[in-house]
Amino acid sequence: MRDNYTQLYIHCVWATWDRLSIITPDIQSAIYAEIIRQCQQLKSTPIVVGGVADHVHLLAGIPPTLSISELMKAVKGSSSHFVTHVIRPGEFFKWQGSYGAFSVSPDHLDRIANYIRNQPQHHAQDILTPHWELPPPVRAGGH
């Protein structure tokens, strides 16, 4: 083999600050478009972006030269900046500092992509795959 060949896929999920429901329908598609744009700028291949009002899922192919932490820092940073400086200047919007990231076999891309595309339905019907979701926020008093 003369050239390197990789198939590296990652499923990332991250939440808004304090799991606030601030990804409203009027800005959701613009946020997702910015996430896609940033992925492409990093030579990552976005497959699907989806989520609900308090968190986002991203399924992407990544080049071997890009670390998950670099991808997440750039995607979260650019999308947050986009919201606070372009879409809603001066309004509060912030991501939590943490994220979840899961390696994905090429054989499972369709299954995970469908899960991400159908986030609103999964959450409305409470048919979630726990290890693909973030844990609920910890509230004062341990609840």
Image (cartoon, grey):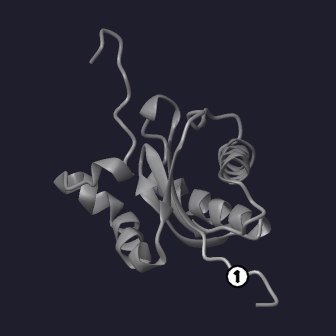
Residue furthest right in the image: 2
Q: Nearer the viewer, residue 55 or 28?
A: 55
Question: Which residue is rendered at x = 33% and y = 66% of the image?
Answer: 118
Q: Position of residue 60 (x, y in %)?
A: 58, 68
To which quarter of the image does residue 39 belong? bottom right
Q: Position of residue 89 (x, y in %)?
A: 71, 41
Residue furthest top in the image: 141
- Seen in the image, is 119 located left or right of residue 106? left
Q: Nearer the viewer, residue 6 or 73?
A: 6
Question: Which residue is rendered at x = 43% and y = 43% of the image?
Answer: 54
Residue identified by numbered label 1: 5
**What amino acid does circle 1 point to?**
Tyr
- Seen in the image, is 4 located left or right of residue 53? right
Question: Which residue is rendered at x = 61% and y = 76% of the image?
Answer: 7
Q: As displayed, is residue 125 above or below residue 7? A: above
To which quarter of the image does residue 143 belong? top left
Q: Nearer the viewer, residue 111 or 40?
A: 111
Question: Which residue is rendered at x = 42% and y = 47% of the image?
Answer: 53
Q: Nearer the viewer, residue 12 or 76?
A: 12
